[in-house]
Image (cartoon, grey):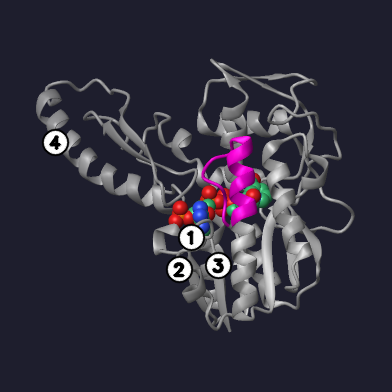
Amino acid sequence: MKIVVIGGSGLIGKKVVTNLRQRGHEVVAASPSSGVNTVTGEGLAQALAGAQVVVDVANAPSWEDNAVLAFFETSGRNLLAAEAAAGVGHHVALSVVGTDRLLASGYFRAKMAQENLIKASKIPFTIVHATQFFEFVKNIAQSASAGSTIRLSPVLMQPMVSDDVAAAVADVALGEPMNAMVEVAGPDKIRQDELVRQFLTATGDPRNVVTDANAGYYGIKVNDQSLVPGDNPRLGTTRFEEWLGRTTPQKKAIEPQATPPSSLPGKVGKVVALLLCGIVFAALSKVTLTMAATTEPKEAKLTELTSKDLTDLPGKEGLMLVIEYPPGSSS
Ligand SMILES: NC(=O)c1ccc[n+]([C@@H]2O[C@H](COP(=O)([O-])OP(=O)(O)OC[C@H]3O[C@@H](n4cnc5c(N)ncnc54)[C@H](OP(=O)(O)O)[C@@H]3O)[C@@H](O)[C@H]2O)c1
């Protein structure tokens, strides 16, 4: 089956594309960076030719009230018109749990406009409402940050990892159109202030979260029903602590230790381990020469040289560390 993923280069889009390709489908990852623009219409007709399903996981480049509304309205109109012309049989769109309860926000008014266009079109559809992504927690912290203080309400949330969102969207794309909305959410409910506190602790961010019942969510009033799903959501399986553990290993890595770290998870672990091998070898040779005369046991010295966000691995950082093991240390 030919499936076009609009926004196929984005956080969710890339994962939906991979998921569907692994299941044997012909998938076009469509976005401005590959010459398909739903706002200008560029490349749309060619991309959609022969497609049975279109998945829209695009997002607006600007979230300013007027700009985001113009994006989702124009993009939605152009896309649905192109789908009608191409005879597409299922339009799948990703939106946000609680969109209809959050209309004091310009962003959610724009998502509502996108959903209304879909419902008003003649194309069979399924709208997937997801809760906030774990990867979005950094953005929530940033939005409420003033200096070293982050003021957040303790409103209930039920966030989820982007992989679980993408898996749900891919499953929906391969199913029959429901002409309705389905909800997906994370396995656990957690309060917003606590969620961000856990994120800051895991990433070694020294900012302080102040709980403020009036702080709202992106400046709008919310209650404990606003951001969580209704009765029967599909639940993701990845827990926030588990995700934090595998995406934020840097804090453990920079704690001084007697032996080099041997089990840092994932790609960061490999990057750090490779750097360590070379740097530790060099440091050892130097220290051995300069300190050979002393027999007094010394602590290993650890210095962080640089850290850099790995753009292909959201939430992960590459670290360059120097560990100096003096002669006589236990390693
Ligand atoms: N953040 C959350 O917690 C959350 C929760 C629930 C639902 N959602 C929804 O999830 C969706 C995807 O979010 P995301 O974080 O994966 O987005 P993202 O990483 O910011 O990616 C945005 C995608 O949209 C594409 N795009 C931008 N302008 C376009 C245009 N004119 N025509 C076609 N494509 C265009 C981008 O293409 P280029 O790379 O080529 O520019 C990119 O592929 C959004 O609709 C959002 O409302 C988000």
Q: Earlier in the sequence, mark 2 or mark 1?
A: 1
Is label 3 or label 1 in front?
Answer: 1
At mark 3, the secondary structure is strand
Q: CA distance from mark 2 to mark 1?
A: 7 Å
Three-letter code for the amino acid on which mark 4 is drawn: Ser
Q: Counting residues from the N terminus, which is met first, the one under dot 3 or under dot 4?
A: 3
- The x and y percentages for residue 282 are 16, 38
- Marks 1,4: beta carbons within 8 A: no
Residue 5, numbered label: 3
- Name the residue beneath numbered marker 2: 43
Camera-side mark, 2 or 3: 2
Of 101 and 288, nearer the camera is: 101
Given contact means CB atoms under 8 Å apart, are the residues at marks 3 and 4 in contact? no
Counting residues from the N terminus, which is met first, the one under dot 4 or under dot 2? 2
Residue span colored magenta: 58-74
The tag on residue 37 is 1
Q: Nearer the viewer, residue 246 or 315?
A: 315
Label 1, label 4: how many angstroms apart (C-alpha)? 56 Å
Residue wearing tag 4: 285
SS of the residue at dot 4? helix
Question: What amino acid is found at the position of numbered circle 1 in the picture?
Answer: Asn
- Cα distance between the residues tagged 4 and 2: 58 Å
SS state under label 1: loop
The verdict on label 1 being within 8 Å of ligand 1 is: yes
Q: Secondary structure at mark 2?
A: loop
For residue 322, the mark is none
